[in-house]
Image (cartoon, rainbow, N blue to C red):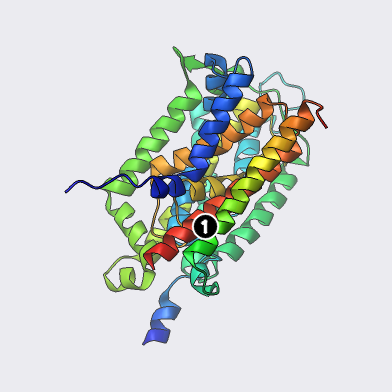
């Protein structure tokens, strides 16, 4: 019956269950990743602004 | 019992918005003409068609699907609008036999055509059970091919004045584009929050099998969602064409990724079942304000692309964080 129900559902998406398919990650690890990305974002903007002003 | 304000939670839930607000303040303080009515109007005019596209895509995302054909659909809609609304005395008219049509009629024709493409998407996904990623990826390429065929890969222009006024005109201080976006926003808010269709949509996104067992017509709902999305791309393409004063096969290229990213930033979960119209608007604003700030700061467009990519990654990571916390 479970298989039938699975078949009945629409094709699914690239994203369906994507979080369940990830390996066990802790919230702390995700927090660290977000922090790194945020620092990278600030760095990219800073480099872009400095280059636009011909500082380097 | 009063709930204490959790600063850490507030910052983590709104990290991107806080960053962009800080960037906007910094840009305003260091450049001239940032906090001006002209710049605000420019922001509104750029945000409006993107918000309409994001509203269309949001239904697909909330039901755990996606629509990669959005950008090309916008391009085709812009080209179709161009073909129907070129000036009668324009020498390079694509369809010389088309009579002088009022722009609302042309808009309805384009909406019907793009709604049909949406219906095909919906049927392929809900009836043939093709994953939305694959179905809409195929449709994206088909639409691009059709657009190339009907336009002969020639850019189009020479629009009627009445069509150009749709994008450039305003009702007092309010641009017509903003009025379109506000009406669509209100419609989608009503649809998502006050109608059965909205409830079914969230139910399907939360748990499709449970929704089916509870008596929701999942097939019908999905088809309606994709038809509505197609209609929104038609409207957005119509407005984008009017704003640009021209259209080509390149129009709308990449718009789907921006729309999906804006929805994700605005809280539409990649896991389905969650999403608000207000959040979608915030997501679109975040992207546009980021672009405008970096433009004002004189930053090379290449850095803007990198920054946008990082914003998308942060948005998805924040969504994952919310999911892990719930788990």
Residue B138 placement: quadrant: bottom right
Residue A50 placement: quadrant: top right
The percent coordinates of residue B221 (x first, y second) are 38, 59
Give the residue drawn at x 61%, y 26%: B243
State the residue in front, B245 or B66.
Answer: B66
In the image, residue B120 sits, relative to residue B178, either above or below, namely below
B169 left or right of B94 in image: left
State the residue in front, B150 or A5.
Answer: A5
Q: Is there any visible trace of residue B105 in the rendered image?
A: yes
B179 left or right of B299 in image: left
In the image, residue B186 sits, relative to residue B2, either above or below, namely above
B278 left or right of B300 in image: left
**Residue sitting farthest toward the left:** B1
Label 1 sits on a secondary structure element that is: helix
The percent coordinates of residue B272 (x first, y second) are 43, 60
Residue B49 placement: quadrant: top right
In the image, residue A15 sits, relative to residue B114, either above or below, namely below
Disc 1: which chain? Answer: A
The percent coordinates of residue A32 (x first, y second) are 56, 58
Give the residue drawn at x 54%, y 38%: B19
Q: Is there any visible trace of residue B248 in the rendered image?
A: no
Q: Which residue is mark 1?
A: A31
């Amino acid at each position: 019956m479970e298989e039938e129900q699975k078949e009945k559902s629409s094709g699914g998406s690239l994203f369906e269950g994507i979080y369940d398919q990830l390996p066990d990650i802790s919230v702390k690890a995700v927090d660290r990743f977000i922090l790194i990305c945020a620092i990278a974002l600030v760095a990219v903007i800073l480099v872009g602004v400095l280059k636009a002003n011909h500082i380097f | 019992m009063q709930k204490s304000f959790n600063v850490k939670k507030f910052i983590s839930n709104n990290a991107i918005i806080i960053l962009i607000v800080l960037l906007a303040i910094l840009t305003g303080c260091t450049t001239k003409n940032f906090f001006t009515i002209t710049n605000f109007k420019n922001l509104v005019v750029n945000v409006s068609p993107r918000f309409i596209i994001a509203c269309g895509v949001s239904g697909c995302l909330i039901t755990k699907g996606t629509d990669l054909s959005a950008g090309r659909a916008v391009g085709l809609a812009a080209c179709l609008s161009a073909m129907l609304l070129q000036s009668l005395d324009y020498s390079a008219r694509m369809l010389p036999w088309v009579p002088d049509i009022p722009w609302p009629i042309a808009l309805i024709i384009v909406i019907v055509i793009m709604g049909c493409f949406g219906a095909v998407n919906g049927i392929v996904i809900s009836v043939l059970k093709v994953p939305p990623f694959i179905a809409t990826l195929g449709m994206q390429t088909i639409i691009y091919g059709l657009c190339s065929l009907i336009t002969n890969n020639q850019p189009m222009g020479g629009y009627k004045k009445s069509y150009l006024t749709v994008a450039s005109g305003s009702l007092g201080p309010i641009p017509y584009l903003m009025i379109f976006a506000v009406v669509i926003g209100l419609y989608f808010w009503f649809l998502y929050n006050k109608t059965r269709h909205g409830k079914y949509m969230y139910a399907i996104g939360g748990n499709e099998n449970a929704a089916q067992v509870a008596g929701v017509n999942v097939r019908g709902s999905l088809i309606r969602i994709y038809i509505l999305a197609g209609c929104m791309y038609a409207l957005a393409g119509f407005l984008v064409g009017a704003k640009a004063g021209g259209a080509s096969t390149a129009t709308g290229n990449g718009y789907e990724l921006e729309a999906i990213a804006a929805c994700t930033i605005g809280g539409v979960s990649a896991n389905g079942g969650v999403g608000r119209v207000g959040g979608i608007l915030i997501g679109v604003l975040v992207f546009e304000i980021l672009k405008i700030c970096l433009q004002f700061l004189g930053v090379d467009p290449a850095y803007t692309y990198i920054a946008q990519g990082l914003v998308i990654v942060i948005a998805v990571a924040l969504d994952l964080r919310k999911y892990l916390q719930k788990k």
